[in-house]
Image: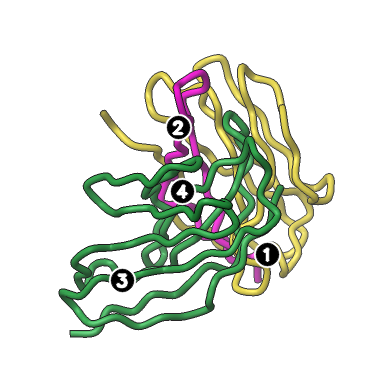
């Protein structure tokens, strides 16, 4: 079974631009979560989507948004990029309803804002 | 979510058992202990989880104290590939959000 895939793997943007990152979960997984990882703040939860609905949201500004499609693929968008948005963005999927819902992480998208 | 406390770094010799401690003194009765690890620049990888009984799988063993206020992850025969940051997380079963602390940076030395 293929793992979680994220595209692109690397991205360079400039301040003020916007960016869209994509995540394809493991087949059959309907929950997709997004995390931001920076050297200073570590791994922080952004939001979680299930059945095309955002169920949980972390403490990030409204510039960070996401959505989920009917095939469970998810995208996250960051508008008006700031230097501090440079980070590794990780996506994780899980099989909701299982005995325990282990989260499977993708390799991440490394975003650099110049 | 309950918070966890882990030592920032540890070293272990290759072939020896690596014992990683975690303190979770405020854990609630319905919260599980999960361990993930992150090898440099990769996504975190699930290792093991438990509620109150000791658990073992092909990767590791998890020992939870009787009062559930602390636990230890044991890698029985550490290899160089086990060098990673190890995260101890407590969360309610079914909750999707993982709250990561700073973890323990484990270095396996040849």
Marker disc for residue B2: none
- Residue topped by disc 2: A24
Of residues B33 and A104, the one drawn nearer to the viewer in this rendering: B33
Among numbered discs 4 and 2, the one appearing first in the sequence: 4
- Residue topped by disc 3: B18
Dot 4: within a 10 Å radius of its alpha carbon, few (fewer than 14), some, or many (20 or more) residues?
some
Chain with green colouring: B
- Residue topped by disc 1: A14
- Residue topped by disc 4: A8
Q: Quadrant of residue A111?
A: bottom right
Among numbered discs 2 and 1, the one appearing first in the sequence: 1
**Residue at image point 71% right, 47% down:** B1
Distance, label 4 to label 1, CA atoms, is 16 Å
Can you tell which of label 4 and label 2 is closer to the viewer? 2
Distance, label 3 to label 2, CA atoms, is 34 Å
Distance, label 3 to label 1, CA atoms, is 43 Å
Q: Quadrant of residue A28?
A: top left
Q: Which contiguous range is marked in magenta?
A: A86-114
Of residues A76 and B109, the one drawn nearer to the viewer in this rendering: B109
**Residue at image point 76% right, 64% down:** A82
């Amino acid at each position: 079974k293929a793992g979680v895939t994220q595209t692109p793997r690397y991205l360079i943007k400039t301040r003020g631009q916007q960016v869209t990152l994509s995540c394809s979960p493991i087949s059959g997984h309907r929950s997709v979560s997004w995390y931001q990882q920076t050297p200073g703040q570590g791994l922080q939860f952004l939001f979680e989507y299930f059945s095309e609905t955002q169920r949980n949201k972390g403490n990030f500004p409204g510039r960070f948004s996401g959505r989920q499609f009917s095939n469970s693929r998810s995208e996250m968008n960051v508008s008006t990029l700031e230097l501090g948005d440079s980070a590794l963005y990780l996506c994780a999927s899980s099989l909701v309803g299982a005995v325990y819902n282990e989260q499977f992480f993708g390799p991440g998208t490394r975003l650099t804002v110049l | 979510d309950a918070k966890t406390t882990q030592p920032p770094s540890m070293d272990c010799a290759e072939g020896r058992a690596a014992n990683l401690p975690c303190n979770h003194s405020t854990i609630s009765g319905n919260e599980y202990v999960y361990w993930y690890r992150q090898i440099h620049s990769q996504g975190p990888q699930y290792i093991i989880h438990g509620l109150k009984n000791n658990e073992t799988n092909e990767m590791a063993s998890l020992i939870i104290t009787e009062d559930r206020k602390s636990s230890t992850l044991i890698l029985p025969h550490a290899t160089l590939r086990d060098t990673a940051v190890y995260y101890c997380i407590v969360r309610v079963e079914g909750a999707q959000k993982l709250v990561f602390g700073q973890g323990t940076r484990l270095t396996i030395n040849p």
